[in-house]
Image (cartoon, coloured by chain):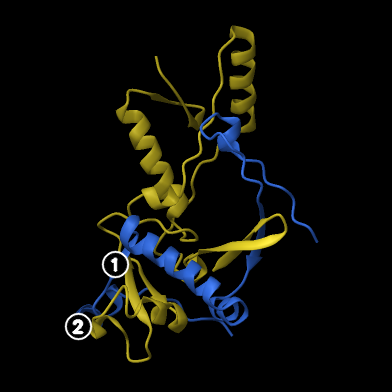
Amino acid sequence: MNPQLRRSARVNAGVKRHDDRYEWNLMSLGVGEAIQKFRDVAADACKAELHQLFIEKKAFNTSKMERNNQRVEEEGDKVTHVPQRKV
Amino acid sequence: MFLKEKYEDGNFVKMKARLVADGWMQDRLVYPDHSSPTVKTKSVMTCLKLAAVKGWSLTKIDITSAYLCADIGRDDEVFMILDRTMSNLCKGWLLEVKEYFREDGKLVVKLDKALYSLIQSAKLWYQELSGFLLSKGLKVCPSDPCVFSRG
């Protein structure tokens, strides 16, 4: 199935001169499955996303496991709100 | 994780990945009020009618990665476990320190921004945007919390 052409809003707004003719095909794939199927292309895409979230957007940062475990021991249920999965 | 292919003249060009948090795993009892207001259709139609009658010019903007502009408050702490494949991708170039990784090789991260798919992300983004607009002197419409006006 040929995906529909996505019109560039930036060209319409006059921000960009040239309209890149591109088409997007949305997929819902797991990381493992995507890497298995598309190899380095998928891995590079994941790395770019991680770079954006970690460094550019600073959306999250790493958390040391020692400190987390220590807090769980000290504060118990106050710091854990993870519901159990229903099977 | 959503991946998109980019095509140019029928040839595969590139792929984009989007990391989302599994918000369904969050405890909803912790967030009793997480709803975010959305603009009413009546408000949109009223604005369009006013613009047409009074000859106003209309414009629209797109805020890229909007949710990621909103900070998670200091009172709230959200941790996320990246799966083993994603964690392995961080090794070598992003993270060298082993103490961040769990014994099973997964990486635990603390969220600072409202990542897509979190329960509270929409509300945080609304608070961020409305706070900015109010700081610029705009006033919120009493009948629709998504409409702001000056004067």
A29 on left or right of B64: right
Question: Residue B58 or A65: which is nearer the viewer?
Answer: B58
Which residue: 57% across, 75% down?
A: A30
Task: Please indicate, yes or no, whether residue B17 appears anywhere in the rendered image.
Answer: yes
Question: Residue A13 or B144: which is nearer the viewer?
Answer: A13
In the picture of the structure, the residue carrying the numbered disc 1 is A61
Q: Element at badge 2?
A: helix
Q: Amino acid at mark 1?
A: Asn
- Classify residue B86 by image quadrant: bottom left
Question: Residue B19 or A22: which is nearer the viewer?
Answer: A22
In the picture of the structure, the residue carrying the numbered disc 2 is A70
Please tell me which of labels 1 and 2 falls first in the chain: 1
In the depicted structure, whether residue A19 falls above or below residue A26: above
Chain B drawing hue: yellow
Which residue: 59% across, 82% down?
A: A36
What is the distance, in whole Å, between disc 1 and disc 2 at their CAs?
A: 18 Å
For the residues carrying marks 1 and 2, which lies nearer the camera in this image? 1
Image quadrant containing the C terminus of chain B? top left
Which residue: 28% across, 73% down?
A: A78
Which residue: 39% across, 36% down?
A: B130
Residue B8 locus on image (x, y percent): 66, 55
Chain A drawing hue: blue
Chain letter for mark 1:
A
- Which residue appears farthest toward the right when viewing the image? A1
Task: Please indicate, yes or no, whether residue B33 appears anywhere in the rendered image.
Answer: no
